[in-house]
Image (spheres, grey):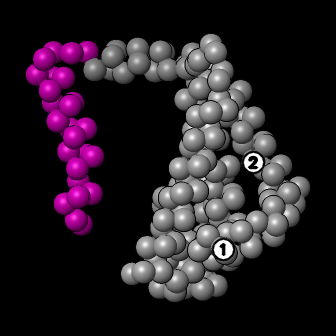
Amino acid sequence: MKWVALIIPALFLAVFIYGLVRRVKLYDCFTEGVKEAFPLILSIFPYLAAMLILSSLFEMSGLAKMLTNFLSPAFRALGIPPEISPLVLIKPFSGSGSTAILSEILSAYGPDSYIGRCACVAYGSSETVFYISAVYFAGLKKKRLFRPTLIALGANFLGVVAGCLLCRVM
């Protein structure tokens, strides 16, 4: 076993011992924290449910495949291999869907190929923007999501372009 795997358990144990030394009622504090989490979960749930349903509909409707076919030439011009286009398009919507696509790409082309490296960099350098937006903006009273979401999508895309460029050079 590597020592890095022990960091989280050691940290948990240190906090537990610190609480015991300070005579904190650990179980009571834990249950109080759980009670405070329920209103947060209830406020976030509708947004998360909507994003999960919309991402599933995007994939199942065939819209993702049509958009991939339409944008592949533009991606190729920017240095993104067309084989990873589905990954680039699905990642902002669905983490599990993009993991499945990454797995398919790696099994088809191998992790050491240019396409495999680009897929790994694209997967690692991007985020599920719509899921994160739903979580972060759920508690806001004024829902001005367009600009931050557009900036996050642009940053994701630039990260993929730069990553594929670096994969080509290295």
Q: Residues within 10 Å of mark 1 (few under 14, many from 20)?
A: few
- Marks 1/2 in contact by CB < 8 Å: the verdict is no
* Residues at marks 1 and 2, CA–CA distance in whole angstroms: 27 Å
Q: Tell me: residue 140, above or below residue 65.
A: above
Q: For residue 124, say whether it is visible.
A: yes
Q: Position of residue 138 (x, y in %)?
A: 61, 24
Could you tell me which residue is drawn at 54 percent across and 65 percent down? 161
Q: Residues within 10 Å of mark 2 (few under 14, many from 20)?
A: many
Residue 39: quarter of image: top right
Could you tell me which residue is drawn at 27 percent across and 57 percent down? 5
Find the magenta span and give its range.
1-25
Please say whether residue 138 is one of the residues in the magenta stretch.
no
Farthest residue to the left: give it: 21
Residue 30: quarter of image: top left
Q: Which residue is mark 1?
A: 77
Q: Which residue is mark 2?
A: 55
Could you tell me which residue is drawn at 33 percent across and 16 percent down? 29
Q: Position of residue 70 (x, y in %)?
A: 82, 66
The three-letter amino acid code for the residue at tag 1 is Ala
The three-letter amino acid code for the residue at tag 2 is Ser
Residue 32 shown left or right of residue 122 in the figure: left
Mark closer to the chain start, 1 or 2: 2
Q: Tell me: residue 110, above or below residue 71.
A: below
